[in-house]
Amino acid sequence: MAWLCGSPPVVVAVTVMKTAAMEATARQERYPELKPVQSINAHPSNCICIKFDPMGKYFATGSADALVSLWDVDELVCVRCFSRLDWPVRTLSFSHDGKMLASASEDHFIDIAEVETGDKLWEVQCESPTFTVAWHPKRPLLAFACDDKDGKYDSSREAGTVKLFGLPNDS
C-alpha cells in the first residue's frame, strides 16, 4: 500500500482479484472515505509491494511472478517491466531523484536499474535473501536488510543486520 500525495490524496493498494486467473490489481481509493477511484490489472499473480517515485511520475509494483512493473501515474499504463529476479519480489525503493529503482527478493542479489531505460546499473551481491531496501532521502546510498539467520551470523539472535551500498569503495 502506498500514498499518492495530491489533491485530494489517494491511497493505492495492490490486491488479488478473486477470479480464475487470480490476477493482481492496483486500486486507487480516495481518502478519507476510501471509495474506489480506479482499478487496473497489474500482474498475473499476487502483487507483494508498491512504491511511488519521489517525483510523482511513476509507481512500481513487485509481484510473486518475479516481475517488477513500472507504471506511469498519469496514464496508468505499464511502461516497462524488469525481469532480472527469479523469486517473488519482496521490496522496492526509488532513489531520492527517482532515477534508480532497487528491487530485491529471495535471490541473493539486489537489482538496481535505471528507471528511464530499464538498464541494469548494479547487481549488489548478498549472502541471503533480502527483505527490505531503502534509498537515502538525499543521497545515492542504499540501505538493505537480509535474512542473516543462517550462515556466519549468530542464528540465536533476533536482531538482523543493516547493510549499505553506495559508499565510496562500493562498485
Image (cartoon, helix red, strand yellow):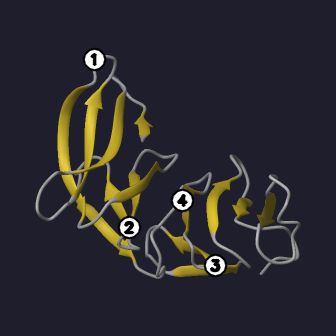
Looking at the image, tell me whether mark 4 or mark 2 is earlier in sequence order. 2
Tell me the quarter of the picture where residue 27 sits.
Answer: top left
Residue highlighted by disc 4: 91
Q: CA–CA distance between discs 4 and 3?
A: 12 Å
Three-letter code for the amino acid on which mark 2 is drawn: Ala
Callout 4 environment at 10 Å: few (<14), some (14 to 19), or many (20+)?
many
Give the SS element for disc 2. Answer: loop
Q: Is residue 154 left or right of residue 71?
A: right
Looking at the image, tell me whether mark 1 or mark 2 is earlier in sequence order. 1
Q: In the rendered image, which quarter contains the N terminus?
A: top left
| Residue at the extreme left of the image, as rendered | 20
The disc at residue 64 is: 2
Q: CA–CA distance between discs 1 and 4?
A: 28 Å
Q: Nearer the viewer, residue 69 or 66?
A: 66
Look at the image and tell me whether residue 150 can be seen: yes
Residue at 51 percent across and 62 percent down: it is: 90
Q: Is residue 168 left or right of residue 39?
A: right
Residue highlighted by disc 3: 109
Check if mark 1's residue and mark 3's residue have beta carbons within 8 Å.
no
Callout 1 environment at 10 Å: few (<14), some (14 to 19), or many (20+)?
few
Looking at the image, tell me whether mark 1 or mark 3 is earlier in sequence order. 1
Q: CA–CA distance between discs 1 and 3?
A: 40 Å
